[in-house]
Amino acid sequence: MSILVDSSVWIEYFRGSNDSGAMDFLIDENLLVTNDLILAELIPVLHVRRHRKLIGLMREVKKTPMTLDWDELIQMQLVCLRNGVNKVGLSDLMIAQHAVHNNLTLYSRDKHFSLIAKHLHLKLYNQSGT
């Protein structure tokens, strides 16, 4: 099992969140993967804040390449809209598509991913490991 960790979880982890046990477990078990989009969301902020060591560590996380299917992204957005799941950004749809295409489980703090998962084949990670 590989877990795609969304930037929302990384940000909380970097802030020293009290519930960092799940991330510690995933790191210890080497279950984490990332992609260029998530890195593009995180690294500029880390760079501005001069967290060079953290940037180096983030670049060491196994990265799975992204392949975008624009027609599928349009269909995903249509499914969301038809089911009342509004205001889902394109970057989040790309992350969801990436997780589905690569059989990854997504770990995110963003609530709209749980709404998306009800209508698409997106697997979500929770702290109990499922």
Image: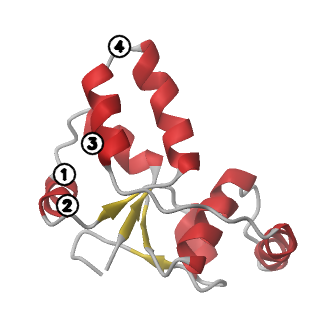
Quarter-of-image position of residue 95: bottom right
Find residue 83 and report its horizontal and vertical position in percent.
Answer: 77, 79
In the image, what residue type sits under mark 3? Tyr
In the image, what residue type sits under mark 4? Arg
The kind of secondary structure element at disc 4 is loop
The kind of secondary structure element at disc 2 is helix
- Mark closest to the chain's N terminus, 2 or 4: 2
Q: CA distance from mark 2 to mark 4?
A: 26 Å
Tell me whether circle 1 and circle 4 mark residues in contact (CB < 8 Å).
no
Q: CA distance from mark 4 to mark 3?
A: 17 Å
Viewer-nearest of discs 1 and 2: 2
Q: Quadrant of the N terminus?
A: bottom left
- Mark closest to the chain's N terminus, 3 or 1: 3
Task: Compare residues 97 and 89 and report the one nearer the observer.
Answer: 97
Q: Of the numbered discs in the image, which one, if any, rests on residue 13?
A: 3
Q: Would residue 120 be found to the left or right of residue 53 on screen?
A: right
Q: Residues within 10 Å of mark 3 (few under 14, many from 20)?
A: some
Q: Of the numbered discs in the image, which one, if any, rests on residue 50?
A: 4
Find residue 55 and report its horizontal and vertical position in percent.
Answer: 35, 30
Quarter-of-image position of residue 84: bottom right
Q: Residue at x 59, y 68 (%)?
A: 98
Q: Which residue is mark 2?
A: 22
